[in-house]
Amino acid sequence: MAAMISSWNPEKKHSDVERWICIYPAYLNSKKTLAQGRKLPKASCVENPTHQEIRDVLVAAGLRVGVENKLYPREPSKEILFRGRIRVQLKNDDGTPVKPDLPTRDAVMKHIGEQIPKLKTRQNRPADQQPQATQASNKSKGKKGRR
């Protein structure tokens, strides 16, 4: 990925980075609406995926992956958490899929949505976040509004 990516050209081979598909974390975010950029049904999506999680899943699947420091155009937040565009090689130079079980962009995104919840980083996360959310809601209950 060190080489500069040039504009798209039909003569480029499928192995050239310019021909790889792009996946932004927003495509798989269950917190987003279709208008905000989600591409799959909410049942197939995960809550706030990161580009590292997507990369880990794709590398484990045996696909060639590149990560770019890009921001999704429809993303209102410029935070580092939402940055990252993943490039994935879907086809070999002869046009056959690199992975026969993942021949299309939709198949790759569904695979990512299924595998991210199984990552070790996701196994511990929900339990850690639940107590913080309940503590914050308990603190907000008070008599400040009544006088």
Image (cartoon, rainbow, N blue to C red):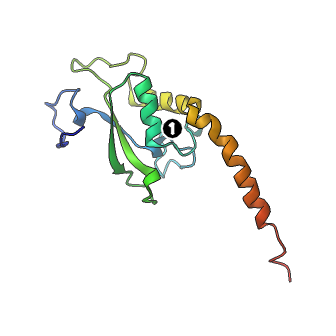
Residue at image x 73%, y 50%? Answer: 131
Location of residue 89 by image quarter: top left
Residue at x-position 40% and y-position 27%: 59
- Which quadrant is home to the C terminus? bottom right
Q: Position of residue 57 (x, y in %)?
A: 46, 29
Q: Residue at x 73, y 60 (%)?
A: 136
Quarter of the rendering containing residue 73: bottom left
Q: x%, y% of residue 90?
A: 33, 26
The quarter in which the N terminus is drawn is top left
Of all residues, the one furthest to the bottom in this rendering is 147
Residue visible at 46% across and 48% down in the picture:
37
Determine whether, in the image, residue 125 is placed left or right of residue 3.
right
Rendered view: 145 above or below 27: below
Residue 115 in picture, x, y percent from top left = 53, 28
Mark 1: amino acid:
Leu
Q: Which residue is mark 1?
A: 40
